[in-house]
Image (cartoon, rainbow, N blue to C red):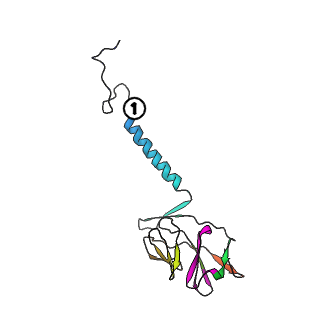
Amino acid sequence: MTHPEKARPVTDDAPRATRPGVGRRTVFAGTGAAVAIGAVAACGGGTTTTDDGSGQQQTGDVPDGAPGTELGPASEVPVGGGTIYSDEQIVVTQPTEGEFTGLSAVCPHQGCAVGSVAGGVIVCPCHDSRFGLDGTVLQGPARQPLESRPVTVADGTITLA
């Protein structure tokens, strides 16, 4: 038998004298935070993060392509320009005749793939960072250069070293 004077409705804001512990709102808020953290962690696989000392985080995927991977003929890389090898995440430039430079095609700002090489400039389409043919930053928001990736040229073929 229930006594009406002792029964009272329980709302989210009512104190829980008979059930100590965590309330529903706290559980739901905690669950939402855990899901968000898990989603961010799942999206971050294969990335590296560094701090360049300026307080800006630099994030990018680790480039593919193992040493010994043939990229293509040296004739594909124009003098004063470059060629992007998307599958290997490599940019090969030829600043002067016969001088080849290998660089990561992953922008150190937020991990986007660079999109073009034109007029002696490597351009990241995501935030318009621009790099010289040696990988140096010409225009931010990137603050770190493109990572060097050693290449060799033998018998007219460019190979990752």
Q: Residue at x 31, y 14 (%)?
A: 3
Q: Residue furthest left?
A: 5
Residue identifier under label 1 = 21
Q: Quadrant of residue 28?
A: top left
Q: Is residue 90 above or below residue 30?
A: below
Determine the secondary structure under disc 1: loop
Quadrant assignment, res 68: bottom right
Quick one: which residue is furthest to the top in this view? 1
Residue located 62% across and 67% down the image: 87
Percent x, y for residue 12?
33, 33
| Residue 94 colored in magenta in the image | yes
Q: Name the kind of residue labelled 1 in the image.
A: Gly
Q: Nearer the viewer, residue 74 or 137?
A: 74
Number of residue marks = 1
Picture coordinates of residue 160 (x, y %)?
66, 73
Residue 156, horizontal then vertical, whole percent: 69, 82
Q: Within 10 Å of the Cα at label 1, are there few (<14), some (14-19), or many (20+) other Cα atoms?
A: few
Magenta residues (range): 76-100
* Location of the N terminus (image quadrant): top left
Q: Nearer the viewer, residue 75 or 97?
A: 75
Q: Residue furthest right?
A: 155
Vertical side of 118 occupied by 114: above or below: above
Q: Nearer the viewer, residue 135 or 155?
A: 155
Residue closer to the observer: 115 or 12 = 115
- Is residue 98 shown in magenta? yes
Quarter that holds the C terminus: bottom right
- Say left or right for 56 vs 160: left
Residue 92 coordinates in the image, percent (x, y): 59, 77
Question: Which image quadrant is residue 71 in?
Answer: bottom right
7 w.r.t. 29: above or below: above
